[in-house]
Image: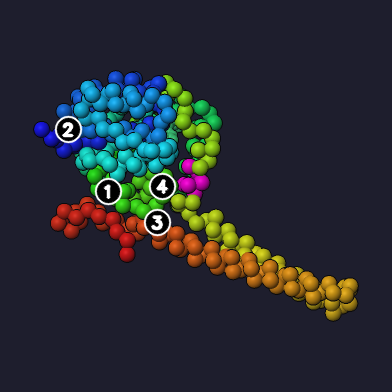
Amino acid sequence: MPAPHPVLSVVVPMFNEADVLPMLVARLRPVLDGLDEAYELLAVDDGSKDQTPVLLQAARRTWPQLRVLRLRANAGHQAAISAGLAAARGDWVVTLDADLQDPPEVIPGMLEAARAEQVDVVYGVRTDRSSDSAFKRRSAHAFYATMRMMGATGAPDNAGDYRLMSRATVDAVNALPEDHRVLRLVVPALGFPSTTVGYVRAERAAGSSKYPLATMVRLSVDSVTGFSSAPLRLATWFGLGGFVLAVALLVYALVAKLTGATVAGWTSTVVIVAAFGALQLLCLGVLGEYVGRIYATLQRRPTYYVAHDSLHDGSDRAGSP
Ligand code: UDP
Ligand code: MG
């Protein structure tokens, strides 16, 4: 008998999570079985080098709803979730970390909230982060504040990657051509109606964090470059500033020459250096502007959103011109 079409898919990225996997199965399975809906658990094994794949295969024998997507090499948290979203079949998709920091018991409430409030996205929001280190809390706060300044609006405070998404949302995410997308910023940017469900973030149940500082830096760089061409625009401002300075230098050199306060050859050298410097900086700025536009176009983020069924023909789409 073919498995019924899942109403809910739960996508769990895991990288070397053998220590926590038995606990995850023990906590998650009763929650999902208790839903009384067809579901699938999509474990994305992000190139684990420990016993994770072995344990997953063993779990599959007694848990028919468990599907395992194994990535050939470690691709990183965000990429692993993206892989899971592409493979998920449910009408609703929840993404959940493997380490039980985000309690699976919240899932039924998320589904209920989505249906009751008729929204596409339910963000799990951490109402209490006392289990995270002060450094993690502070850096996260600075991160979200910066990203808001850069135009990544709509991301609720203290929301990570624990969220429920409708099929329409998942399809929209899957259709984005961007590499290195930071889902916690991209999903709000898609503009689907959303609500939040609060929960208390726990300590990692077992094992150690798979997010070293270098990965956090990588995530920040991806976030900034994904949401703003502000760094590129810097080239324009440096270019213009440099241009003005170079012209001033030119004028100064000519005046110095006319008043005779220079040594031979100085004026011509300064004039050449300043003129070419100014020209280069200006051209770099112009290039930066065009590269920024090319990038924005390539991202194919929707530029407008049509609200649910506003044409009364069942349409629900985001579009680009
Ligand atoms: N993870 C992954 N690939 C990686 C790093 C992490 O799939 O390269 C998974 C990890 O197994 C966990 C989730 O992403 O399920 C979040 O990682 P972690 O709990 O280590 O991050 P933290 O909570 O410390 O920020
Ligand atoms: Mg964690």
Say which label, 3 or 1, has the lower sequence index.
1
Instruction: Report if the CB atoms under discs 3 and 2 are less than 8 Å apart.
Output: no
What label does residue 217 carry, if any? none
For the residue marked with disc 4, what is the amino acid?
A: Arg
Residue 309 lies, with reference to residue 254, above or below; the image says: above
Label 4 sits on residue: 181
Say which residue appears at 47% left-offset and 28% top-offset: 209
What label does residue 299 carry, if any? 3
Residue 256 lies, with reference to residue 14, above or below; the image says: below
Say which label, 2 or 4, has the lower sequence index.
2
Q: Residue furthest bottom?
A: 258
For the residue marked with disc 1, what is the amino acid?
A: Asp
SS state under label 4:
loop
Instruction: Report if the CB atoms under discs 1 and 4 are less than 8 Å apart.
Output: no
Say which label, 3 or 2, has the lower sequence index.
2
- Image quarter (top left, top right, bottom left or bottom right) of the N terminus: top left
What is the crowding at mark 4: few (fewer than 14 residues within 10 Å), some, or many (at least 20)? many
SS state under label 1:
helix
Say which residue appears at 62% left-offset and 61% top-offset: 238
Label 1 sits on residue: 171
Which stretch is magenta?
219-224
Say which residue appears at 26% left-offset and 33% top-offset: 67
The Cα atoms of the two marked residues, 2 and 4, are separated by 30 Å
For the residue marked with disc 2, what is the amino acid?
A: Ala
For the residue marked with disc 3, what is the amino acid?
A: Gln
The location of residue 154, given as percent across then percent down, is 38, 46
The location of residue 18, given as percent across then percent down, is 39, 23
Choose top left, top right, bottom left or bottom right for residue 282: bottom right
Q: Is mark 4 within 8 Å of ligand 1?
A: no
What is the crowding at mark 1: few (fewer than 14 residues within 10 Å), some, or many (at least 20)? few
Q: Is mark 2 within 8 Å of ligand 1?
A: no
Most frequent secondary structure within the magenta stretch: helix
